[in-house]
Each structure stands twice: as C-alpha cells, then as structure tokens.
Image: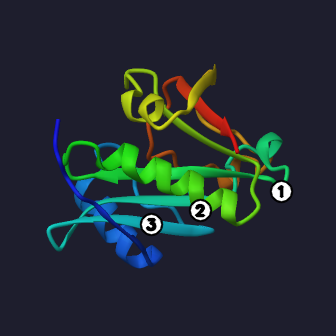
Amino acid sequence: MTNARFVLAPCELREAAAFILQHHRHHRPPQGHRFSLKAILDGRVVAVAVVGRPVARHQQDGETVEIVRLCADGTPNACSFLIGAVKRSARALGYKRVISYTLESEAGASWRAAGMSQTGMTTGGAWSGTYGESKRRLNLHPLCPKRRWEIRL
C-alpha cells in the first residue's frame, strides 16, 4: 500500500495518446474522446484515463460514457484513483452510467476498488461491419473475450 497523494488534472488527447503509446501493454491510443484526465505524482504523470462515447452501438444511449483507455506506469493505486475521478466528472457532466472493458485475463482489482461491478462478458472476435471486402477493418487490438464493468451514477 502507498500513501501517494495524487493530483488530478485535465489531459489533452495528444498528451494522453503519447502516454498510452509509451506505457499501454496491448492497445493503441483512441482516435477521439469526450474528456481525458491524468494523475500526477511528485510532478510527473503516472496515469491517464480517456473517456469517450461507448464503442458498442447498443450502449450509446446519450447517458453513458466509456473509459476507452486507462493506462498507468505501474504506480500503485493510480488506476483506481482515476476511475474514481472519471465517475465524479461524468456525474458532474450529467452522465448516468460509466462502463469499460478489460481483457478476460485481467483481474479487475482497480475497477472493483473504485466501486464498479462486472456486468457481462463479450464474445470477443473481430468486427465485420458492413463494409464489404474492399474495406476490411484492421484489428490491432486483442480479439479475446472481455469483461464489461459498469457503475450507475
């Protein structure tokens, strides 16, 4: 356990993307966001959270945001600190629910510590879309099943 005193700050998408490129194990930075936050400890950024509209169309109800990337440099408690900050920020902006997904192999301790509950599993796999053969998606992310986490605000 750590006695870390994190400082919360807004984060431009460009800064979050650079941090994600350097530290994330299996995802590239997202293309856009509603807002992003960073955790600072001793004057340096130790984690970022990028929040956007839900990726899954059936979750896009106008009242839900998704933590599309959560990335830390290994600093203990940084992820749960940011999840809590996202929840407070989303509530202040009028959102009613926060969701996110983790790989099946990830335990989800930070999500549980921040009060989120696992509410389902995806089947995994690639998106096929309706683009036809000439516009296939390039899937540069893990295609395994994922856990869905959520909290009602």
The front one of 84 and 55 is: 84
Circle number at residue 37 = 3
- Mark 2 falls on what kind of element? helix
Q: 10 Å neighbourhood of mark 1: few (<14), some, or many (≥20)?
A: few
In this picture, residue 81 sits left or right of residue 137:
left
Residue plotted at (37% across, 26% down): 106
Q: CA distance from mark 2 to mark 3?
A: 9 Å
Q: 10 Å neighbourhood of mark 2: few (<14), some, or many (≥20)?
A: some
Q: Is residue 103 above or below residue 70?
A: above
Q: Quadrant of the N terminus?
A: top left
Mark 2 or mark 3, which has the lower sequence index? 3
Q: Quadrant of residue 117?
A: top right
Q: Is residue 73 above or below residue 31?
A: above
Mark 1 or mark 2, which has the lower sequence index? 1
Tell me if label 1 and label 3 are in contact, CB under 8 Å. no
Residue carrying label 2 = 89
User: Label 2 sits on what residue type?
Assistant: Ser
Residue carrying label 1 = 62
Tell me if label 2 and label 3 are in contact, CB under 8 Å. yes
Q: Quadrant of residue 91?
A: bottom right
